[in-house]
Amino acid sequence: MTPDTVTTLDEIVDNFSLLEDWDDRYRYVIELGRALSPLAARDRTEANKVQGCASQVWLATIVHPNGQGGPVLTFSGDSDAHIVRGLIAILFAMFSGKQARAILSTDAIAVFERLGLREHLTPQRSNGFRSMVERIRADAQAALATAA
């Protein structure tokens, strides 16, 4: 499983600011999702399925113990919905390859709102995004608890 960090969060924010039309932003989010590495079949398990999403969403987490800095988490994931794959790519830009403490101190919902996604996605998609964030945060907390 390789981490998907093709596009940085700063690049995503910059690109969003250049796209004024929401149709263009949707297309961009879908393109981000297309750039994700495919999720291995072995990771499409019930344990990796994110509950609370209207579409099928899988998130697999690898914890890399990292000594004094604490554990680092990398993620892979997939969804059966194109827009959700794009949201996964945005979350990976935010969180994958980061230390657990940094993940827990990042306000993903604030970034979500800063990108203007909240008012342009259905409530179901917004709830699904929150469910994915909660799952990532829970994995980060579990990694810290294990490292302690």
Image: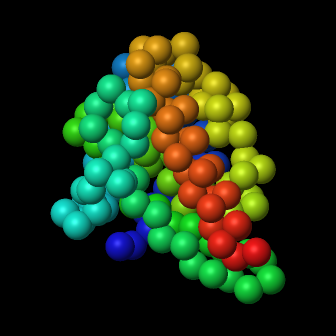
Which of 47/24 is in front? 47
Q: Residue drawn at (56%, 20%), measured in percent from left and top?
A: 118
Seen in the picture, residue 102 relative to 66 is either above or below; the reply is above
Question: Does residue 85 show up?
Answer: no
Query: Residue 10 at x, y = what percent?
Result: 64, 49
Picture quadrant where residue 37 is located: bottom left
Tally of numbered tags: 0
Q: Observer-nearest residue: 11 or 39?
A: 39
Q: Name the residue: 48% across, 71% down.
A: 62
Decide if residue 78 is on the left or right side of residue 64.
left
Q: Position of residue 24 (x, y in %)?
A: 39, 26
Quadrant occupied by the C terminus: bottom right
Q: Position of residue 132 (x, y in %)?
A: 49, 41
Give the residue furthest to the left.
41
State left or right for residue 84 relative to residue 147: left
Residue 50 in picture, x, y percent from top left? 40, 42
Residue 88 vs residue 59, the one in the foreground: 59
Seen in the picture, residue 58 relative to 113 is either above or below; the reply is below
Reply above or below: 62 against 37: below
Q: Is residue 23 visible?
A: yes
Residue 61 against residue 132 in the figure, above or below = below
Question: Relative to residue 34, is residue 113 drawn left or right?
Answer: right
Q: How is the image coloured?
A: rainbow
Say which residue appears at 70% left-offset and 66% top-offset. 145
